[in-house]
Amino acid sequence: MTTLRSYVSGEWHAPTGDGTPILDAVTGDEVARVSAAGVDRPAAVTYARGVGGPALRSRTFHQRAAILKSLAKHLRDHREELYALSARTGATRGDARFDVDGGIGVLFSYASKGRRELPNDTVYVDGPVEPLGRQGTFVGQHVMSPLHGVAVQINAFNFPVWGPLEKFAPAFLAGVPSLVKPASQTAYLTHRLVEIIVDSGLLPDGTLQLLCGAAGDLLDHLTEQDLLSFTGSAATARQLRTHPTIVRDSVRFNAEADSLNMSVLGPDATPGGTVFDLFVDQLVTEMTVKAGQKCTAIRRALVPRELMDAVSDAVADRLSRVVVGDPGNETVTMGALASLEQRDEVRRGVKALAAATRTVSGDPRHVDTVDADPERGAFLAPILLRADDPNAAEPHEIEAFGPVSTLVPYTSVEQAVELAARGRGSLVGSVVSADADVAARVVRGAAPWHGRILVLDPDDAAESTGHGSPLPMLSHGGPGRAGGGEEMGGVRGVLHHMQRTAVQASPKVLGRVTGRWVPGGPRREDSRHPFHKSLAELRVGDHVTAGPRTVTAEDVAHFAEFTGDTFYAHTDAEAAAANPFFDGIVAHGYLVVSLAAGLFVAPEPGPVLANYGLENLRFLTPVAPGDALTVTLTAGQITPRVDADYGEVRWDADVVNQNGESVARYDVLTLVAKEWKR
């Protein structure tokens, strides 16, 4: 059998010794052996910091995003191979797609987020400029820069593709290299994933490393610039969190641990109705996908007491049609658990739950299988339990990490919320109800104990991704026993790998740090209109000042008639004078913006291709007939696109009256060609 290699310090390392056998979850045959004997762990983290980190930090967010997109496309071409190998972990075709396609989807999502929401720069600006002095010469702003370390990522056995990729993607986009340590039971699938990635040649050296086998003294070599992310049991998370190096150097730590997730069936449900059926379908799906080995699966199904019998019967009927066996058989709908050890662990959990529950469906000691030996393979029947006493401790404290769920009755929405909180912190909860008031009460009440809450109703059912599906654009994590951390979460997941620094400086210096023009900073003097400059020629600080343009009563009246905006402040002098903000008729705010555009726009064809919006528009001082407007338009931020022949320019627009008072301030967004032939 093959002994899995580690990919460290830029090369594949074959371990010394025989290693520990990894068995096929379906047949019990040996698949591979795993060992990290002989791996130089200190050299691996040093290589990440010294080679991978600089390679990533030299690239912009957009360039990193482009690499993620290319990698996602490359992996998509290898899905069938990964699906086939997933079957040896006990996964059905649907389970494999959940894992493999989900991981590839994370790469695509972060590639898109990076291009759309992050700058084509190496520094991320967090929040607006803060004035720190009265004259505007002393200002502050938060900037974020990638940590100069390595992100060590310890993953669980249940998602050997999605798990590593969900951690790798935000770290890579942030500019931090990753060192992945998969769980041994399914490490051969992560190993093949990394082989495919390395062979693609898409990643800069040192940005992804793989450690197959024991972590050993790896954590001893982390520093204050490194990060540690963990998915697994709460007990292991506690050990990692209190590791002397993690504590001493305040190593940034994120954990996703045990989670007794709940789903609430709303009291508006009726047997056979749409809401009732949605709940039953979701519960059965969550019990059987990945054989229930999901940190997001439903462990506690909270049901109105009067519906307990109906739900028990409906779920048991559905579970009786689940076909357990070899995932290679197309009739099989639920495969094996990841290992015999995992099956034993689930059986122990079911036995512990028996103190407060009775079995509705399934036998932990017997299961009929198709094309598989139920003893050699790690097979288990889906097990539905029922706790008639909602206050019994066991259902709220014991997680059987497999195809096991417990029905728990409630008598009021308030009690349902109270029971939800008994999980002491969960990754996800859900409420299935067509009553928006009930759903809102559950969400508001349960939110402090949950990282994510799904509301499933007839309106969103067709598009809902389901209770157990984390999405890369939203936070994945939970409070309390769920670990207290957050993975993914769109840009939040990226920023987790970066240091926020408050910079206090003059507008000139702050502008140089952020790469953006800061009000009060110097403008570039140039006789050419900035709209005549291509992206290659334009510089931050280029500007045009135009005006004045006197606003007349006729302008205001015409604009009101032309647009249909006849609000009294623009048309009725007496009513306008009675308004506490005005002394009489005032110009429309959009008239002011339109007049400003007429002042600063260069009308002839040029490199400015389109105006695609305004942001941060504020009307600061009323404009009355007779006021004279002057506008200054300054290039504030220039963002070339890596995959197009144009880029975005954000312009600062400041419109002032004859007294120098700002009447309107906003950002103008344009698309500008990189090159332009006159």
Image (spheres, rainbow, N blue to C red):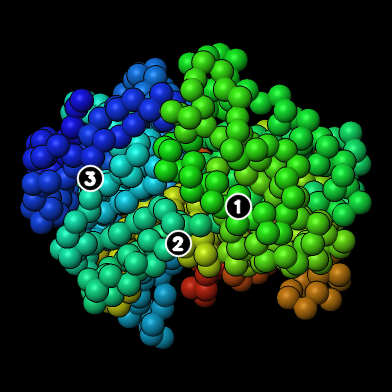
Which residue sits furthest bottom?
134
Q: Is residue 575 above or below residue 598?
A: below
Looking at the rendered structure, the kind of residue marked 1 is Lys
Can residue 297 be seen here? The reply is yes
Mark 3: secondary structure: loop
Q: Nearer the viewer, residue 667 or 663?
A: 667
The image position of residue 5, as x and y in percent, is 16, 35
Marks 1 and 3: CB-CB under 8 Å? no
Mark 2: secondary structure: helix
Q: Which is closer to the viewer, label 2 or label 1?
A: 1
Looking at the rendered structure, the kind of residue marked 2 is Ala
Q: Nearer the viewer, residue 381 or 49?
A: 381
Q: Is residue 138 above or below residue 357?
A: below
The image position of residue 259, as x and y in percent, is 55, 56
The residue singled out by tag 2 in the image is 234
The residue singled out by tag 1 in the image is 351
Q: Nearer the viewer, residue 465 or 19?
A: 19
Quarter of the image for the C terminus: give it. Answer: top left
The residue singled out by tag 3 in the image is 213
Dot 1 or dot 3: first in sequence order is 3
Please tell me how crowded label 2 is: few (under 14), some (14-19), or many (20+) other residues with Cα within 10 Å: some
The image position of residue 505, as x and y in percent, is 27, 76
Q: CA distance from mark 1 to mark 3?
A: 31 Å
Please tell me how crowded label 3 is: few (under 14), some (14-19), or many (20+) other residues with Cα within 10 Å: many
